[in-house]
Image (cartoon, helix red, strand yellow):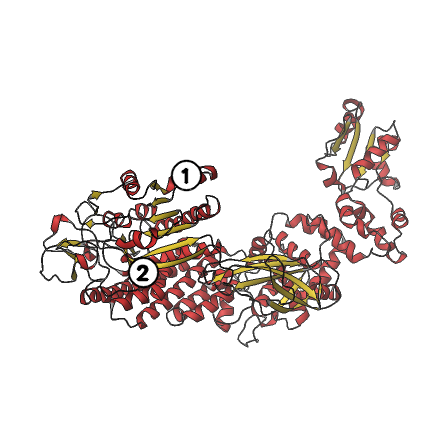
Amino acid sequence: MQTEVDKIYSYFDGNPSLKVLFIFDDRFIVDALQNVEWKEGYRYEVFNGSWFKTKYNITHEWTNQKVVLLFQNMISPLGNAEQMRKFPLLDLLIANTEYKATTWEQFVQEYEIPAVHADYVRRHVTELEQVGIKNILLPYYTKNAFNPDVCNRGIISAYLGQDHLIDWIEIIARMIVTSNTDKRDAFFRKLQKNTDVYNSINDKLAAIFGVKLSVNNADRLQDAIEIMKYNAITQTLSLDSKDIYHTLKIDASDRIRQINSIIDYAANNAKLSEAFFKAIADQGKKIHENEIIKVYGYDADYRLVTSEMFKPIIKGIVSELLPVDSEEVQNRISNLLIRLDAGDVQSRSILNYIDYVALLNASIKTQQATMMTTTEEFVSAYTNTLYLTDSYYRQSLAAYGQIKCDDTELEDLLKQVKSRVDDDYTYQCNVLNRKWVTALAQHNGFDEIISAHRQQDFFKEFVAVNTTKTVVIVVDALRFELAQELLLLLAKDHNTAYMENMLAMVPTETKYCKSALLPHDTIAYDPEGVVVDGQKVAGIDPRSRYLASHVEGAEVEDFEKVFKFKDDEGKAYFKKNLVYIMYNAIDELCHPATSAEDVTNTCQTSLEKIRSVIRKLHNSWNVKNVIVTSDHGFIYNDIKIDSTNLYKVDDTIVDKEKGTRYYLTDSDKEINEIVKLPLSSVSAFTDDIKVGIPSGTMRLSGHGGYKFAHGGASLQEIIIPVIVSSQVRDTKVSKVGVNVMERNLTIVSSMLRFNAIQTEPVSMEHRERTIICGIYDNDRLVSEEIVAVLNSTDSSPAGRIQLVEIKLNNNVQSNLLKLKIFNKDKTIDYLNPLYVGDIINNTLIERDEF
């Protein structure tokens, strides 16, 4: 296709004596010539108003160049005697040539345009031949495809910077975005110069919104945007007589459908979404969301929830629902997530936090309702359900740390929520453990617990029984709830793994507990740490020598070194029959941590790193059996802990052995708020010493940090995991389910967008599922097929939602289509869809209505 530049060159090529080519008022050629790198000997100039200097340059300075001279906002004087007389460069114009675009007659003849459209071509031939517009519309320059609507859309598409023909839905969405940028005035000036295009836009706006472009307002689309905003929010509600915006209400379903199509298109376009909703907020600011909520309430079923609406809605949820109905809070959050502005990251992060708070509240209520008396009942209840309270608290802290709030009122509200959450969790954790520690005293420590292994028996019961090479990963301070999350991550990797419970020795300190995980015949107390088989084995090298003395060729290695192994290094190193890997980051980094965010980030990073090494051990380094365990757990409360709430002990202390959560004593003296247990009842030590444990989760005054603490006998400190992972995969395990969040599925601009929700988190009981989604006209596939992997381990339903986008790639004449979702393994089970739902094909409706 010949471009404007090619045409210009052809003028000079066809007339070697031509020196100057005059171009008049071709506003469409300006952009095409602006950044051209001209051939040697050519010069492009835009007339600057100086007649004398221009004539002098042509006749003196530019005589050896071929000059392309553009006169903007000026029509050719040729053919008008008066204009010719006044034109100072008339002699040069007559001696040279004026640039002429293709005539409309030539255009009609060349492309066989029907006579009915000839008048349109006559008015627009210049635009239709302009390179940017012609690139878009050339496929439609045929006798069957050419029509003014297509051409108007093509011209507007070019004005909007597009390189292809877009439909009216996208045009209006992009116009709204452009109207809120510094390109606004230039865009609307172009429109006003083109009467047919300008009128076509007004016709579309009037058909949808009942208004046209504003003539007297710089924000030309403001009236339409206000109507769009109001109806996008309230369309699902019955009109209330107290609604001050009632005159903006649109009842016609076809117009509402088109408004929704515009919003849905923008919301699901990652490059457009944020700017679109900002334009709606800026130019629709006269529609006050608080006035709407004042009439219809925070809990109304709004179709769209804007950023401004979010504050009163979340305030209502937090103040009225969160304290009493966690399940309803989660339902509201799931609905809000699919109604929020797509680019509203702040609101989404707040909802994520409130969702975890709701889960935590529900778990606390479960804990309060659980009746436990014996130590066995406590351990069983904690490892089955009560550990979730600790998990949700940690996850709520992580979610809170992700919030970047720029609204002071919202920030204050969230601080109040967090303060209440911290207090509620701290209180409940303390109440639970006061009862638990009392049970320990009444039932002789661990003696009656049958559902958990003892830490000192770990090697004998889990390692020595293996006949193939084994790797043990000892994670310092991997408490039970963290291990449950690790187990879910391993399920995503298709490992077969299970977890058993183990009781850490008290005091739950590394110097006592870690060496108990090594092989030994005897184990004894020493104030500097455990003595196993007569040896003190603290540190990597001493433990490695000790382990090798019991298991030939065995080694102990630091996790960080293993983490950096390349595949060949790992394969060579793990030819050994037994390796212990020591991971210390959780304990080392969380003790000095200055914020909850540091603690939660450390925990999450640790889980991912451990998962990564297990994956390499199984898949790359040929290790079949991997065991993950811990020396002890921990308690963590993100509250201020200082001298006012630390407990000072006045008692005899053996070997000066005292920590934040325990002390050793040989005294029988009763101390208020302290429970004394024979050390032998909660450890492998036989010494006649007692361990003093604070009742509940109190901290003793002393050295060290207090928010992150261990050493005592709380459930969180003593119940530790033993995860056994292998490469063997259980193919009989069921897979997670899938459903669709939207009640009404619609195709807009040939695109279907919906939110698929994974009905259960991935676990060892429910493995990930791969699905394939398509749009069907009866049994005929009329779209691309989209593959999605459902592999979330999130306990919150809101965290298991993912957006799916499917594009039509076939012509369809039906208004009603089907979304079908199938399971995908090695083959696709097309006979048994997992989901079938009706779709309204708005693409076809748009063509009919427009």
Task: From the viewer's side, name the closer residue of 234 and 597.
Answer: 597
Secondary structure type for disc 1: helix
Which SS class for mark 2?
helix
The disc, 1 or 2, on the residue closer to the chain's N-terminal end is 2
Quadrant where the image shows the C terminus: bottom right
Q: Quadrant of the N terminus?
A: top right
Q: Residue at x 75, y 59 (%)?
A: 200
**1 and 2 marks in contact (CB < 8 Å):** no
Q: Which mark is residue 573?
A: 1
Q: Look at mark 2 in the image and give the residue it sits on.
A: 422
Within 10 Å of disc 2 (Cα), the crowding (few <14, some 14-19, many 20+) is some
Q: Quadrant of residue 548?
A: top left
Q: Looking at the picture, how far across and down is residue 53, in whole percent? A: 75, 28
Quick check: 583 above or below 461? above
Amino acid carrying mark 2 in the image: Asp
| Residue lying at 43% horizontally and 55% vertically, measured from the top left | 405
Q: Nearer the viewer, residue 507 or 319?
A: 507
Q: Is residue 172 visible?
A: yes
